[in-house]
Amino acid sequence: MRNKELTFWLFITPVLLSLSLVVIVPVIMGLFYSFTNWDGLTITEFVGFSHYQRLLGDEQFIQSLWFTVRFSIASIILLNVIGLGLAMLVTSKLKSKNILRTVFFMPNLIGGLILGFIWQFIFIRVFAAVGEFIGVEALQVWLATPTTGFWGIVILTVWQMAGYIMIIYIAYLQGVPKELLESAEIDGATPFQKFRHVIFPLIAPAFTVTMFLTLSNSFKIYDQNLSLTGGGPFNSTQMVAMNIVDTAFSGNQMAYGQSKAIVFFIIVALISLTQVYYNKKREVDL
Amino acid sequence: MKKKQRSLIVLEIFGILLGLVWLSPFYLMIVNSFKDPRGIFSNVLTPPSELNVSNYQQAFEDLEFVRSFFNSLLITGASVIIIILFSSMAGYALARNKSKLSNALLLLFVAAMLIPFQSVMIPLTSNFGQIGMLNRLGLILMYLGFGCSLSIFLYHGAMTGISVTLDEAARMDGATKFQIFWRIIFPLLKPISVTVAILNVIWIWNDYLLPSLVLGNNSQTIPIRMFYFFGQYTKQWHLALAGLTIAIIPVIIFYFTSQKQIVEGVAEGALK
């Protein structure tokens, strides 16, 4: 019996140890540090909630949070509409469906940093050239204004992640029974009616999955933000993750940066827990 | 029936056009990577009039591509191998040992997935810095910590499909736990190991923020090297684009050699 327990622990210890070192201990220490004047090495006093109070009046932080929320909403809507559209396209009877699936998914495998640089070229050089040619000024100063910078990151994210969302929708679409679609056709349903009354109710659960995936992914975005706009112009397109990195590592305010990181953790955890709750509820309903 | 066929042709054309739109960023990157600055300025949309390979020579050298490629390969390879070894062992132990303790441990691993990287990175890099582990070894250890949760979860799920009678039969024959796992169970887990490998390769290969905080100047990965390279060549698009093209090639090769497994693996990881 003792021998059995020993092997159990032998099998578990490597991962348990690394998880503790890398995640559990830092998160506890981080929570503690956020109440002190920690500078990365030493602590001389406890400052209570003063970092959190300062955070409420930190316009740049609030702005980056608001930017992230708006960005998440825009990308959730677009990603789901486009991702579902692509999934329906590549599960139809098209001859090109397999190659299209390959194409739509491809950006997903390449890192956000590299994709951001490619799109920086497109927005700055290609959009400018096209804008000059057709005489549209907005195209010539893309990424130079907060609004176009916002849509720049949205376009990049949608292009990168739509293939991923497509894959999830494909899995659900393949679960729609063929007999149901055939009998709807025999009853004379139009393609739209077929979608609205047969397909849509059956793939509705996919929406919960993709919505929360996109939500927590868009909240954590850093690489794309860094390489496409770098937060500019004047930090107007800075997202929360970048705000935290800048505060801690460029601004050298470790404890204050950590208090932002704790707030960020709470927001992301609430989003994920809501997802878990809905998934469980859905399973019960079924 | 005629009408239906015609609408299918319209849809086919629409699909192909959309596919081309999807690929256009890569097209623009590649055609302009062969031009000189003047060529990019005068006509950004058309293919180059001549193939200017010197952009690639310079980008290849300045990216120190051979070194950063092997660094990325070493870090990604080592991390993924230890993630597979240790997560499969843990998934097996947690699935076979049915106790409150193993339920609690599984819950701990799953709960750890809720913690975003940015909320631990500051104490993490400080701790590792103090014990002198801000290097490749430390980075690989960090990838095990961040990558094991989802992997354990996937292995644990896969274990439910493997009957306990296999373990018992092997024990009758006098096999130890280690032998049972490595000789019998681990080979049966191969499909899920492929999924775990793919999900972690995609993430670790492309990761920028963590290695940028951990690694010094001597052991840079492709994304870090790319970041400095790009900063060096802002407004010199011909070189920057050649560098980006070089950086993407390994990923494209990986995608085309194991596309089916990648797409299936990603779907499996997302749906669980």
Image (cartoon, rainbow, N blue to C red):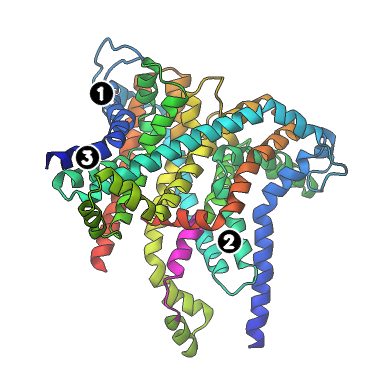
Q: Residues within 10 Å of mark 2 (few under 14, many from 20)?
A: many
- The quadrant in which the N terminus of chain A is found is top left
Q: Residue furthest front?
A: B173
Please give the chain letter of the residue carrying mark 1.
A
The residue singled out by tag 2 in the image is: A101
Q: Residue at x 53, y 55 (%)?
A: A162
Q: Secondary structure at mark 3?
A: helix
Magenta segment, which residues? A164-178
Whichever of labels 3 and 1 marks the residue nearer the N terminus, that label is 3
Q: Nearer the viewer, residue B219 or A127?
A: B219
- Which label lies toward us, 3 or 1? 3
Q: Nearer the viewer, residue B110 or B19?
A: B110
Instruction: Indicate the position of residue A240 as horizontal and vertical percent values.
Output: 43, 34
For the residues labelled 2 and 1, the Cα–Cα distance comes to 48 Å
The residue singled out by tag 1 in the image is: A32
Q: In this orientation, does residue A271 appear?
A: no
- Which label lies toward us, 3 or 2? 3
Q: Which mark is residue A167?
A: none
Q: Residue at x 69, y 69 (%)?
A: B13
Q: Is residue A55 magenta?
A: no
